[in-house]
Amino acid sequence: MARTPSCDKSGMRKGTWTAEEDRKLTAYVTRYGCWNWRQLPKFAGLARCGKSCRLRWLNYLRPNIKRGNYTQEEEEIIIRMHKKLGNRWSTIAAELPGRTDNEVKNHWHTSLKRRVHEQNATTNQETKVLNSKNVESTSGRDHVSKNGSASLQVTFPETSQFSDSTGSLPPFSSSSEFSCISSELTTTSSSIEKLVFEDDFDFLDAFTEHVNENFWSDSEKFDLANISYTPNETVMQIDTNFALQNQDTTQIFDACALSPNQSSSDSLVLDNDLGSFLDANTDPTIDDFWRQPYVTDTSFAAESEYFSTVYDAADDLWSQSNLYDEQHFCLFYF
DNA sequence: AACCGTCACAACCGCATGCGA
DNA sequence: CTCGCATGCGGTTGTGACGGT
């Protein structure tokens, strides 16, 4: 599940992220945003490449990441969209709030792919059986039990799915077959008539929207009660225009508090001077995190032309805005 | 207890794409 | 238009967990 930490040629760490690294990355990104992934690890005190930081943030540390087992609805969406789009994992993941493309991809490869394959195999086999029975029987009574009940198995073409026009059927069957049992074959026939064949899984769209609508407001799944966060919006930007235009969206929560930080790995992160910015703010509380004066060793920053530019921009922003008050957090507070 | 195969998933890698200079 | 950089995306790999023998 985890990789053994190692270093590449340039001294960058690779492999499993430690709790300490997670803490540093989370603290930095939630405070300063992902303004430049390549430069970010240097300022965050991480001996990681920017790519690794980005991946770790997007796939694990980012707020509102949904973890744990997939619901049946989620799996149905994945199957439906994969059938429609193929391996476009990011697009598929976009339909599943809180799930990452990496997670969806893994889940597909580890369980859904095989399941779909088995279903298709079953479907093909049943198609053959049904075809042979059709040849043998002219009555259409496929299965008639001793008590008189009839079972009609309908195999759908691979590119089609069914829906119930009455809405009484579940949106998707866990099996590729639909079995309808009735005491009267005529009843069976009328049930079949209710089926609406479609070229795709469009019948699931409404269901999908239903899930999406309720997902973010379900405070029992996530502690969102006091969080104002737009999922598709970068939390913080070192961009004065952005910040000034988005003051209403700048309330933020302390992602440190939400960070899993549950890795059992030993803390192997390489300490360096660049990480010292965190030392003054270890274990901040949700209430006071953004109001704490930001004390850091900026001695290294003077050597960085980029950071100087950022500093100037922040200073300019500071003089123009009132971001640092009870309602908003402070982008920079030196 | 030791070995082995499989599973789950975090993380890496390389290529594609977008964008600004 | 071209180039270089940053980021996004999908394929693949590595590793711990776990169950079976």
Image (spheres, coloured by chain):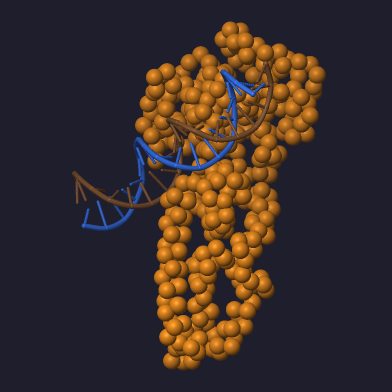
Chain colours: A orange, B brown, C blue
Point out residue A57 in the picture as x, y percentages from the top left corner. 55, 33
Task: Please report the residue visible at 64 percent of the width from the left and 71 percent of the height from the top.
Answer: A196
Q: Is residue A150 visible?
A: no
Q: Residue at x 57, y 25 (%)?
A: A37
Q: Position of residue B6 (x, y in %)?
A: 33, 52
Q: In percent of the image, x 50 and y 86: which residue is there? A: A140
Report whether A83 appears left or right of A7. right
Q: Is residue A202 above or below residue C11?
A: below
Q: Residue at x 47, y 21 (%)?
A: A47
Residues A137 and A287: in front is: A137
Please say if A261 is above or below A76.
Answer: above
- Give the quadrant of the C terminus of chain A: top right
Q: Position of residue A292 (x, y in %)?
A: 66, 23
Q: Quadrant of the N terminus of chain A?
A: top left
Q: Is residue A258 above or below residue A172?
A: above
Where does residue B15 sit, x and y in percent of width and height? 49, 33
Q: Is residue A269 above or below residue A181?
A: above
